[in-house]
Image (tube, grey):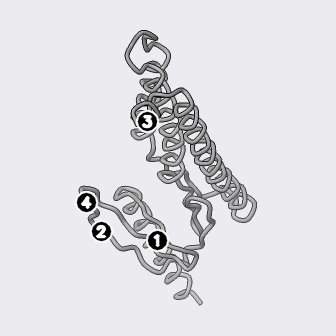
C-alpha cells in the first residue's frame, strides 16, 4: 500500500485533482468579483455617486491574507529540493497560496459596500433601502456579526459594517418620515 502512496503516478493524480479544484474555486471567486463590479456599475448608472460613499473595511484581512500568500509562494520557491518529500510540500504551498489569494478577494468583496441615500451595493446586488426587512446582530463563535435580511436575500455583515448600515438605514427612515410629514 505504501508503494502506491509513494509512486509518482499518485503524486500526479493529486496534482491534477488539486489543480482542478483550485481552478474551479478561483473561477467562482472571479465570477463573484465580476458580479460585485457589475453591481457597482448598475448602481452608478441608476443612482449616480452623488451622496454615496464607499465603505471599505477589508484592509486588515487583505494584509493578513497577502502576508500568508507571500509566505506560501516564498516557501514553495525556496524549499530545498533535497528535503524529504519536497515535491509534496511545494505542491501544498502553491495550492494553499492560490486558495488564500481567492479568500483575499472574497474578503475584499464581502467587506466593502457602496452606501447611498436610496440604495446600497453589497456583494453582487443593488438593494434599495425599502427592501431591508431587518438587521439582526448575533454572536457566531467568537465573531459578532449582523444578519442583514432583505427581500433579495440574506447577507452576513461584520459588526462594524452592520453599525454603518444600521446608521444609514435609520437616516433613510428619518428622511422618509420627514418627506411624508411635508406632504
Residue at 37% x, 66% y is 146
Tell which circle, 3 or 2, labels the residue nearer the N-terminal end.
3
Q: Viewer-proximal residue, 57 or 66?
A: 66
| Residue receiving disc 4 | 141
For label 2, count other residues whose C-alpha is less than 10 Å away and answer few (under 14), some (14-19) or many (20+). few
| Residue receiving disc 2 | 138
Tell which circle, 3 or 1, labels the residue nearer the N-terminal end.
3
Tell which circle, 4 or 3, labels the residue nearer the N-terminal end.
3
Q: Is residue 57 above or below residue 74?
A: below
Q: Secondary structure at mark 3?
A: helix
Tell which circle, 4 or 1, labels the residue nearer the N-terminal end.
4
Tell which circle, 1 or 2, labels the residue nearer the N-terminal end.
2
Give the Cα separation between the discs numbered 3 and 1.
31 Å
For label 1, count other residues whose C-alpha is less than 10 Å away and answer few (under 14), some (14-19) or many (20+). many
State which quarter of the image contains the N terminus. Answer: top left
Q: Position of residue 25 (x, y in %)?
A: 58, 48
Q: Position of residue 108 (x, y in %)?
A: 51, 46
Q: Nearer the viewer, mark 3 or mark 1?
A: 3
Give the side of residue 144 with respect to residue 23, left or right. Answer: left
Disc sitting over residue 154 in the figure: none
Give the side of residue 74 with respect to residue 151, left or right. Answer: left
Report the number of discs: 4
Q: Secondary structure at mark 1?
A: helix
Q: Nearer the viewer, mark 4 or mark 2?
A: 4
Q: Nearer the viewer, mark 4 or mark 1?
A: 4
| Residue receiving disc 1 | 169
Residues at marks 1 and 2 touching, judged by CB atoms closer than 8 Å = no
Residues at marks 4 and 3 touching, judged by CB atoms closer than 8 Å = no
Amino acid at each position: 500500500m505504501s508503494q502506491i502512496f509513494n509512486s509518482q503516478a499518485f503524486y500526479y493524480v493529486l496534482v491534477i485533482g488539486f489543480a482542478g479544484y483550485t481552478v474551479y474555486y478561483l473561477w467562482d471567486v472571479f465570477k463573484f468579483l465580476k458580479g460585485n463590479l457589475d453591481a457597482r456599475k448598475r448602481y452608478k448608472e441608476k443612482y449616480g455617486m452623488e451622496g454615496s460613499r464607499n465603505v471599505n473595511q477589508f484592509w486588515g484581512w487583505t494584509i493578513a491574507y497577502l502576508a500568508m500568500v507571500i509566505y506560501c509562494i516564498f516557501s514553495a520557491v525556496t524549499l530545498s529540493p533535497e528535503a524529504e518529500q519536497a515535491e509534496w510540500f511545494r505542491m501544498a504551498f502553491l495550492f494553499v497560496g492560490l486558495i488564500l489569494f481567492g479568500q483575499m478577494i472574497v474578503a475584499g468583496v464581502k467587506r466593502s459596500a457602496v452606501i447611498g441615500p436610496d440604495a446600497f451595493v453589497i456583494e453582487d446586488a443593488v438593494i434599495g433601502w425599502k427592501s431591508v426587512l431587518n438587521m439582526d446582530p448575533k454572536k457566531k463563535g467568537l465573531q459578532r456579526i449582523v444578519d442583514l435580511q432583505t427581500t433579495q436575500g440574506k447577507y452576513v455583515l461584520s459588526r462594524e459594517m452592520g453599525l454603518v448600515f444600521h446608521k444609514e438605514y435609520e437616516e433613510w427612515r428619518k428622511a422618509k418620515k420627514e418627506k411624508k410629514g411635508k406632504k
